[in-house]
Amino acid sequence: MTPKKPPLTHFLCLPLNSQSAAPQWQASLKHFRANAESLPPPRAGASTAPSASSIPPTVRAVPDKAIRPLGTLHLTIGVMSLTKPEQVDAAIELLRSLEMGNLLAKANEQQESGRSAEVTAASTSSKDSASMPKHIDDGLSQSIRSSSPPPLTLSFTGLKSMQSPKSASLLYTPPTDTTGRLYPFCQALKDRFTQENLMLEEARPLKLHATILNTIYAGKCYPRKGLTPVNSGVDSGSREPGSGDEHGTEGPANREPEDEGHGTAEEDTAKSEGKRHVSVAKKKGKRRKESIRLDARELLSQYVDFAWALDVRVEKLAICEMGAKKTFDDGGKVIGEEYTEVASIALP
């Protein structure tokens, strides 16, 4: 008998919705939302793209609810199953014991070591050491060598799909770190929490990304042209977070490599959700509604070089609860969503 998968309760992340970063993200998401409203249906003639007339006028090419709110933006480092209060306390204690400056400094050292290896390889492979590529030497900047590493600053440019672009459910923008510290830093954090049995182990490589659009939030529909069920088998590729929320509360069931082996724990829960809705299936004589997929090729081409946020300083590391909560204004109107932060620690 297959052991029951542990429920996912929390996740470790780098929040991206700080007060300093919010204006850039807000403007970019507003632009994206406005453009998505006017985006034409999938291109006619493609294998999965119908003609415009085959989609009712009321159906938007990009469902509004699929676009993620500002308050949910983050980079997931790993997911946790903390079902007992003492486990939560242990995770918080570990978080607060971390020396962020030391971890960033070590990431500096690791990056510098890797660049030094590049310099050595370039030097030994050349007949004349003076012909060493200048950009490699320039990469060893003073900021990397410094004993007091600079703040972790990221930029987010472009738009990519976790699945085949013509059958997509999750679109994201990848982080760029010119100092090369981000991945070594996050991997060290992931390893530390995993070693303390506070984070689920994963064989897949870490893939940091900020989710911009996820159709799991757009509800479900009856299968039809232009809106493809999650489990349809059409260029299924990788799958994304689920149970109605980017970080669902189910265990990482039915794990498979995603996005050519570079999927993340965030995608596991959506896959579990999708497994429960059999593609174009009839159960007890009734059709089942399915989570939708989009032909995102046109959208991806439009946003290939789009700058979502530039030179954003990462201000903290946080443990958050699974399941984004709605936020309200004084009049009770829903104004956004955000994850409940259990604990956090500031980055230098």
Image (cartoon, rainbow, N blue to C red):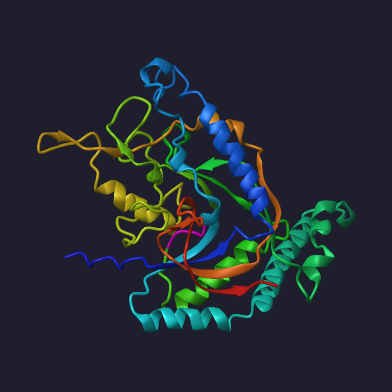
* SS assignment for the magenta stretch, majority: loop
Is residue 157 visible in the rendered image? The answer is no
- The residue depicted at 37 percent of the width and 74 percent of the height is 82
Q: Position of residue 31 (x, y in %)?
A: 61, 37
Closer-to-camera residue (6/116): 6
Q: Where is 239 relative to 284, above or below?
A: below
Q: Position of residue 127 (x, y in %)?
A: 84, 53
Q: Where is 327 relative to 44, above or below?
A: below
Q: Is residue 245 left or right of residue 104?
A: left
Closer-to-camera residue (142/76): 76
Is residue 252 magenta-colored?
Answer: no
Instruction: Count up the numbered dots.
Output: 0
- The residue depicted at 46 percent of the width and 47 percent of the height is 260
Please identify the residue farthest to the left as the structure is shown: 284
Q: Is residue 189 left or right of residue 235?
A: right
Q: Position of residue 221 (x, y in %)?
A: 30, 35
Is residue 206 magenta-colored?
Answer: yes
State the quadrant of the N terminus.
Answer: bottom left
Q: Is residue 229 left or right of residue 68?
A: left
* Range of residues picked out in magenta: 203-207
- The residue depicted at 61 percent of the width and 69 percent of the height is 316
Q: Position of residue 276 (x, y in %)?
A: 24, 48
